[in-house]
Image: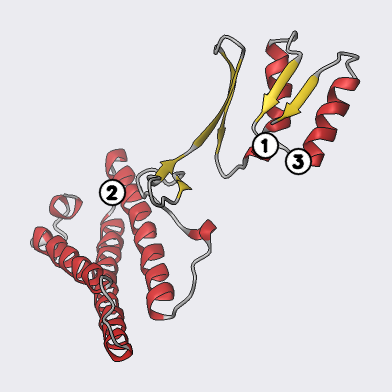
Amino acid sequence: RLCDTHDVTGWRQQAYNVRQVKRKMRAAQMKKRGGGKTEAQKARRHEQMVEAHRTYIDVAQQYLTKARLSLNTLENKGLSKVTERLKVVEIEDYMAHAERQIDQIRRRVLEGEKIPHDEKVFSIFEPHTEWIVKGKAGVPVELGLKVCVLEDQYQFILHHQVMEKTTDDQVAVSMISEARERFVDLATCSFDKGFHSPANQTALNELYLSTQFCLNFSFG
């Protein structure tokens, strides 16, 4: 729409362009299925899979380069409206996602590199999304963010903490200390074993010895 508004040509066939990229993506996905029975068949299938991914990212890179040139042209023309500048920022954000995905596909499929987990993004619309459970027989895949919840004996929620890039053992102390700021009578707390660490046990004991308030923490 920005290109139409400012007479920047080259995107009349945008629907066709999207179909082209999707077609290449599906072709690459199909080549990943099945490996053949013999070593020769497996090797041939692998070559076909690599070539399909190479074609896919080459086409994607062509459109990405074209989009960047169009954005440069728009910037040179001048975008006076705030809404237009915000749209450019949004487009640039998606382009950054595309650059990362192209780079990771190239490294993983073409070069055989194992991508570090902390580089992976599971949703471009919700980049904070984490892979909670990978999934196996009888266990579904879980994506999202873990939330630690502290309840009393009647299941009323006393405190919670969103665990972005955080493990259970990293929130045990903060959950209790923050909860006690509001509920000073908190005297006993039980954790799942995943919250336990020697450092947590020591920190919780030291934290509440200074208050002269006897707390019983158990990790079960």
Instruction: Report if the CB atoms under discs 3 and 2 are less than 8 Å apart.
Output: no
Side of 143 where 69 appears, left or right: left
Of the two numbered discs 3 and 2 on the same chain, state the one appearing first in sequence. 2
Which one is nearer the viewer's eye here, 172 or 118?
172
Q: Residues within 10 Å of mark 1 (few under 14, many from 20)?
A: few
Which structural element holds mark 2?
A: loop
Identify the image quadrant of the C terminus.
top right
Task: Check disc 3 and give the amino acid type.
Answer: Ser
In the image, residue 61 lies at what x, y percent? 29, 71
Side of 154 where 112 appears, left or right: left
In the image, residue 105 lies at what x, y percent? 37, 70
Give the numbered dot on residue 193: 1
Residue underneath mark 3 = 197
Q: At 39% across and 59% down in the image, what residue appears?
A: 96
Which structural element holds mark 1?
A: helix
Task: Check disc 2 and give the amino acid type.
Answer: Leu
Which structural element holds mark 3?
A: loop
Q: Residues within 10 Å of mark 2 (few under 14, many from 20)?
A: some
Residue 190 quadrant: top right
Task: Check disc 1 and give the amino acid type.
Answer: Lys
Q: Residues within 10 Å of mark 3 (few under 14, many from 20)?
A: some
Residue underneath mark 2 = 79
Which one is nearer the viewer's eye here, 163 or 151?
151
Instruction: Report if the CB atoms under discs 2 and 1 are less than 8 Å apart.
Output: no
Q: CA distance from mark 3 to mark 2?
A: 55 Å
Asked if 44 appears above or below 21 in the picture, the reply is: below
In the image, residue 145 lies at what x, y percent? 48, 38
Give the numbered dot on residue 138: none
Asked if 101 appears above or below 133 in the picture, the reply is: below
